[in-house]
Image: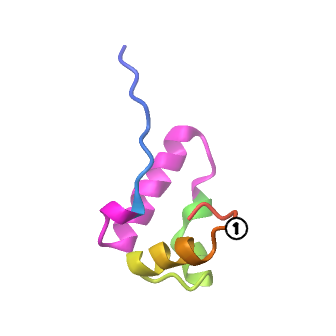
């Protein structure tokens, strides 16, 4: 039996936010975490509608504890 380590998706490697969110949800499931923390509505509540918005959010809010 071969074990594969889950690899966290990097937002900078994506161009589509929906694909990134889907991959993050898969990653969270593989890690045994609650995948609803990375649901699309969470990003919209933070004003994030694109990958560029996400990257800017991370740059401008280093204090944010949200795993975005």
Of residues 54 and 23, the one nearer the viewer is 54
Way the structure is coloured: rainbow
**Which residue sits at x=48%, y=75%?**
54
Residue 47 vs 11, above or below: the answer is below
From the viewer's perspective, is 10 left or right of 34?
A: left
**Which residue sits at x=47%, y=47%?**
27
Image label count = 1
From the viewer's perspective, is 4 left or right of 31?
A: left
* Label 1 neighbour load within 10 Å: few <14, some 14-19, many 20+: few
Q: Position of residue 60 (x, y in %)?
A: 58, 78
Residue 15 vs 27, above or below: the answer is below
Residue hosting label 1: 63
Mark 1: which secondary structure? Answer: loop
- Quadrant including the C terminus: bottom right
Q: Position of residue 56 (x, y in %)?
A: 49, 78
Q: Position of residue 47 (x, y in %)?
A: 56, 86
Q: Position of residue 6 (x, y in %)?
A: 44, 37
Q: Quadrant of residue 38?
A: bottom right
Q: Quadrant of residue 65?
A: bottom right
Residue found farthest to the top: 1
**Which residue sits at x=40%, y=63%?**
11
Where are the magenta residues, as a range? Answer: 12-35
- Quadrant including the N terminus: top left
Q: Magenta-highlighted stretch: main secondary structure? A: helix
Residue 51 among those drawn in magenta: no
Residue 34 vs 38, above or below: the answer is above
């Amino acid at each position: 039996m071969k074990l594969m380590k889950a690899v966290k998706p990097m937002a900078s490697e994506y161009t589509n936010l929906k694909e990134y969110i889907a991959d993050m949800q898969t990653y969270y499931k593989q890690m045994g975490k609650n995948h609803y923390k990375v649901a699309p509505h969470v990003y919209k509540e933070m004003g994030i509608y694109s990958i560029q918005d996400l990257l800017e959010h991370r740059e401008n809010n280093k204090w944010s504890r949200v795993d975005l």
